[in-house]
Image: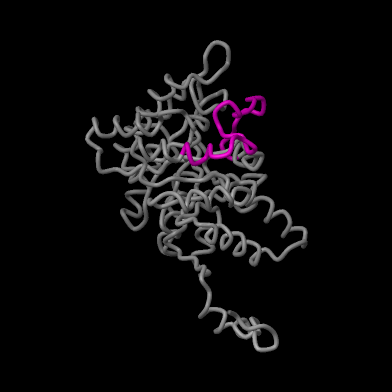
Amino acid sequence: MTAEFPAARPRRLRRTPAMRRMVTSTRLHPAELIMPAFVKEGIAEPQQVGSMPGVVQHTRDSLRKAVHEAAEAGVGGVMLFGIPAVKDSRGSAADDPEGITQRALRDVVAEVGDALVVMADTCLDEVTDHGHCGILTPEGEVDNDATLERYVSMAVAQARAGSQMISPSGMMDGQVGAIRAGLDAAGFSQLPIMAYAAKYASAFFGPFRDAVETPKDFGDRKAYQQDPAGPRGEALREVRLDLAEGADIVMVKPALAYLDILREVRDTVEVPVAAYQVSGEYAMIEAAAANGWIDRDRAIMESLVAIRRAGADLILTYWATEVARRI
C-alpha cells in the first residue's frame, strides 16, 4: 500500500539541489566516458569537421595534446580513427606498421601510457577508397570472409602498435572469433575485445562520414549493418554470437535512438555494455544550441544521463573531455 495526496508528495525529494543529488540513481563518472578522436595523415594544422562543430581532424601533435587533456580530466579511454593520405580498395593503410592509425597509437601510448585505455577502430571504412567496411567483390558486395582476413591483420597491427583494446565495428559475421584467434596466435591473448555487436544502418552516422572523408557515392551499408526495423531479437542474437566468439565488452550503436535495445542488452548479458553517442546525435544538439533553440549544456547532460539510465556502463561521446571536467 502507498499513500496518496496529500500525504504523498513526491516533490519533497526534489526541492533542493542537495536533496536531488542525494536521492539520484543515475550518475555519470569520467572513467565511464570514451573519447572518439580523428587523426589525419599529412596535415599541418587541425582541420575543423564542418558538420561537427568543435570536432577536428587532428594532426599527430594536436592529438597528443587532446589525449593528454582527456587523461587529466579522468576520461576512461580514447578511440582513434585514422584517415590516411592515400586510400585504396583493400585499405592497405589499415595494417601498415607506418600507417596513420598505428603511428597515432604509438604516439598516444607514449603520451599517456595507461592513464586511460587507448584503442582504435578496427574497420576498413576510414581507409578504403570506396568507403565500405570490407573488401568488395567484382559485383560490388562486401565479401564477408575476405574481410575477416583484413580485420585480423588490422587487429594484430594495432596490437603491435600498443592498442590496449581491439574494437571491431564492421558487423561482419564471425569478426570477433576471427580476431580473437588471430590475436591469440600473435601473442596478444591478454588484449580484450570491445565488439560493436548491435550496430544499425543509421542516418545518424552522416557527420562521421564527413570526418573520415567517406566518398559521397559509396552507397549504403544495409546489407551488413542491422535494419532499424529488423527482426525482433536480432540485436540479442548478434550480441550472443559475439560473446560466444570471445567478446569482453559489447556495444550498441547509435545510442539515443536505440535505448530500448540498450536496455535489452544490459538486462541479458553479464559483461560491460557500451553505447556510442554518434556524430548525428552530437551534431543535432550542437546545431540546435547554436540557433538558440535549446540549452546546450543541459541537453548534453540529459542525453548522456538517458544513455546511462538505459543501461550503458561505458559511453563513447565527442563531449567526453568537456563532460568529464564538468562532473
Q: Is residue 118 left or right of residue 55?
A: left
State the residue lying farthest toward the front. 1
State the residue lying farthest toward the top. 138
Q: Main secondary structure of the magenta part?
A: loop
Tell me the residue at 40%/25% (across/down): 148
Residue sitting nearer the eye, 105 or 293? 293
Quarter where residue 32 is shown: bottom left
Q: How is the image coloured?
A: one colour
Residue 258 in picture, x, y percent from top left: 60, 48
Which region is colored magenta? 211-238
Residue 16 in picture, x, y percent from top left: 61, 85
* Above or below, 205 relative to 63: above
Tell me the residue at 64%/50% (across/down): 281
Residue sitting nearer the eye, 158 or 2? 2
**Count of numbered labels shown in the rendering:** 0
Residue sitting nearer the eye, 135 or 263? 263
Tell me the residue at 25%/34% (across/down): 184
Tell me the residue at 46%/33% (across/down): 123
Q: Is residue 139 left or right of residue 182?
A: right
Residue 204 in picture, x, y percent from top left: 64, 43
Quadrant in the picture for the N terminus: bottom right
Quarter where residue 151 is shown: top left
Residue sitting nearer the eye, 201 or 234? 234
* Above or below, 149 relative to 160: above
Is residue 223 within the magenta segment? yes
Is residue 69 within the magenta segment? no
Residue 251 in picture, x, y percent from top left: 47, 45
